[in-house]
Amino acid sequence: MENQHEDLAVVKKMKDGFVYIEMQTSGSCDKCAMHGVCHGMDKKLQHKIKTDMELSEGDFIRVHVSASMRIFSSFIIFIFPILSMLLFYGLGKYLFRFTENFSILFSFAGLVLSGITIYFIDKKYTEKIKFEIIEKVEK
């Protein structure tokens, strides 16, 4: 049984002590209700990991990402936009005394703002996500 905190990746290149990997969708993606939507459907996620392992292009490896990072990412992507919409709706309706229809439109401003915020969080934390290479997978 595969550890649910490990993902399969393929080595794309090695350079200066770093390995450039491409994440593969895993069995956990099939079990998730989103069915791999966080991988952008067929888009593969690429990452750079510092390593001293002997790897070559095309090798398959198992990588680990902490559960807390997975939970944080899921919260930011799926829950934060909903909370932003609700907050902006409440601000529009009860603080600014907008009409119902305008409050709903104002909630979409919260959705747009959350998208911009997610973009900047992604840019800031992309390099901080730590992947750990567990092992090389024999073919």
Image: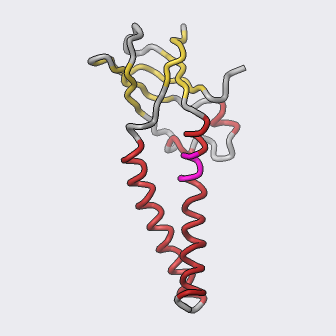
126 drawn magenta: no
Q: Is residue 37 above or below residue 112?
A: above
Please identify the quadrant where the C terminus is shown: top right
Q: What are the residue bounds of the magenta stretch?
A: 72-76
For the point 54% across and 23% down, which residue is it? 8
- How many numbered circles does the render carry? 0
| Residue at the farthest left position | 16
Res. 71 image quadrant? top right
Q: Position of residue 121 (x, y in %)?
A: 42, 51
Q: Is residue 108 above or below residue 100?
A: above
Res. 27 image quadrant? top right
Q: Position of residue 13 (x, y in %)?
A: 33, 19
In depth, the one of 47 and 34 nearer the eye is 47
| Residue at the farthest right position | 1
Q: Position of residue 131 (x, y in %)?
A: 48, 28
Answer left or right for 65 relative to 54.
right
Please identify the quadrant where the N terminus is shown: top right
Q: Position of residue 40 (x, y in %)?
A: 49, 44
Looking at the magenta stretch, what is its main secondary structure?
Answer: helix
Query: How was this image coloured?
Result: secondary structure
In depth, the one of 24 and 72 nearer the eye is 72
For the point 68% across and 41% down, which residue is it? 32
For the point 50% across and 17% down, which residue is it? 61
